[in-house]
Image (cartoon, grey):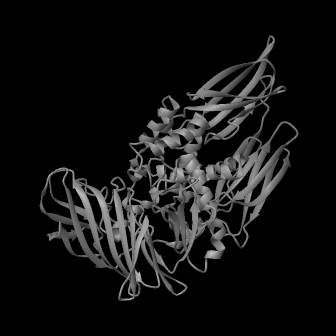
Amino acid sequence: MKILISFLTVLLLSAITYSQQFDESIIKSEMEKYSGSFKAGKINYPGDTNIDVTFYNLDLKLTYSPNYLIGKVTVKAKALNTLTDFFLDLKTALNVDSVKSSGVNVSFTHSDNKINITLERNYLSGEEFEVDVFYQGLPVATGFGSIIYEIHNGTPVMYTLSEPYGANDWWPCKDTPADKADSSEVLITCDENLYAVSNGILAVIQTNPDQTKTYHWKSSYPIAHYLISFAVADYHIYYNYFNYSPTDSMPVIHYIFPDAFSGFQSELDKTTHMLEVFSDRFGLYPFINEKYGHAQFLGGGGMEHQTVSSMGTFNEGLVSHELAHQWFGDQITCRDWHHIWLNEGFATYATGLFYEVKYGNQSYHDYMNGIIPAAKFAQGSVYVQDITDPYYIFDGYRSYSKGAYILHMLRGIVGDSIFFSLLRSYTSSPNLNYGTAVTEDFQAVAESEYGSSLEYFFQEWIYGENYPKYLFNWYSEQTGSGYELRLAVEQELNTSPMFFTMPIKIKIERASGDTTITILNDQQYQQFIIGLTEEPIAVTFDPDNWILKNLTITTNVEGEPADVKYRLEQNYPNPFNPTTIINYSIDRKNSGAFVTLKVYDLLGNEISALVEETKQSGDYTVEFIASDELASGIYFYRLTTGEHSHSKKMLLLK
């Protein structure tokens, strides 16, 4: 999911910086889309725990001008205890006309955003029952939109974005991702010049006498309530096909605004390749008997509605992210919003995997390196402590960027073969497939594939905070016919954990060639002695950035320090418009250091290269002038000298 939020508003009001997933060029438009749309209120979570929903049927009539909804929702469920009454979640802005239980009118009350329903008889634990709720009104959108009525080129556009707490803004449901229905149906009646899109397969289009049409969609797979959706507009329909075997194919259907189709067609055509890549990495597309597709809405961003992602725009980063959610979020859904990284971190990481297959391994590492600044800004644990605030749940630094980097680090620990095997085992696990999961479920699969405990890793990275800050020192000395390479690793003390346990790759360069070893750093200060047959020329700590970290390095050859020191200052003024000053210092005891100082936007796109040259030791000042095209918001500037890299953020206010 990509959240629709005013980034600058949140920054100024709360002083907590919010960003969205790294590789999506639509973030800026999302930030502008629904400024201030979230209305805080009581959150009915996790729904009525006395029932297990098995089926939803939404029969909705939508009108525009006036904006209105008339609905009948059928809920089938099992009683988990002896049951005489239960509740469904529905905002009180909508009027409930009547409720039937097994076809019999029953009593109900509707207050505090709940419909309390008295069943027509007592039900024993395990018995199934069915209720019909008849309701109507003008839904009041909360969260990141939930239900939206708009106009595009004079034609109505109506659509839903329910994650995390918006579903009960427009239909009665059990408001928790933990309880998936076994199947669902959505019937949308709208003006005959519009087309209605929803989950699953289109069973029938019915033409009605009152110049409306009814679109009947059926989904035969388990589905979380917040993934049930509709999108209604004057769509142009464009077909591709995913040929997943020599004899079988699945339709890939794109519902696009007619005036936008030509500009997006080339991006849409990439979807089938993404389906191939992800099916190879994660297992066959999980809803292969139905479809995949996109339904365009206004603005930016996207939402991974099951079998049909709602999209504001189309590019490789966004399209691949939402498609990956069909495995991570839709096929396996986080059981509660505390573990949202299982949805968003996985989908963010999957974009890097797609780049790796399409463009090569270096593209993957470039993508992951680009995520580092945002991941370092994550505050608190990746496990979401406060799930009452959607903005906190979908914090881009934590749930998206840091969540994705955790998967990158896990890959570095277990190796490619085991890593991709465990991803496929996770999606195919009988206990999780088409169900829900928490972090411990994924951990159990990872440990089973790895053959060893990963408790330290998940505890420190999911439930801990921050990241390691290393001081690394090395020197070598001759000992008889060989050499001893002495390594010292020290971590700056953290809060939780006090220090990080991690295997660390060390690259050793010698005249005869390079070798990479792995040391296990499980102490706050630790020394290692490596025996070598020839003198080391250079030693590199974590050469491929498999660890989210800060690193300061000192080296010596005969016991005397001789390495790089550098300092990057905070820009001033900050905030700025349009000019700001950046100071940095280089101290090197040899001929000089090659220095780059670059400015990036929140997506990791390079905005400006301020310095790209060899610098002698000294203090330097650089001026950055923001171009007229740059929008207000957060930007990063990064100083790189050899193995060192340090970033800071600055705020442009126009």
Q: Quadrant of residue 489?
A: top right
Above or below, 638 relative to 88: above
Residue 513 visible in the shown view: yes
Residue sitting at 80 percent across and 48 percent down?
Answer: 595
Instruction: Give 577 or 75, whichever is nearer the viewer.
Output: 75
Above or below, 302 relative to 460: below
Which residue reaches farthest top? 480
Q: Position of residue 273 (x, y in %)?
A: 62, 57
Q: Position of residue 234 (x, y in %)?
A: 51, 81
Which quadrant, please, contains the C terminus? bottom right
Residue 402 visible in the shown view: no
Which residue reaches farthest right? 591
Q: Position of residue 441 (x, y in %)?
A: 42, 41
Q: Quadrant of residue 114?
A: bottom left
Which residue reaches farthest left? 121
Residue sitting at 63 percent across and 32 percent down?
Answer: 504
Above or below, 331 relative to 107: above
Judge from the rendering whether residue 644 lies leftward or rightward of residue 167; answer left or right: right
Q: Position of residue 393 (x, y in %)?
A: 45, 56
Above or below, 30 relative to 586: below
Counting the numbered discs, the total is 0
Judge from the rendering whether residue 286 lies leftward or rightward of residue 518; answer left or right: left
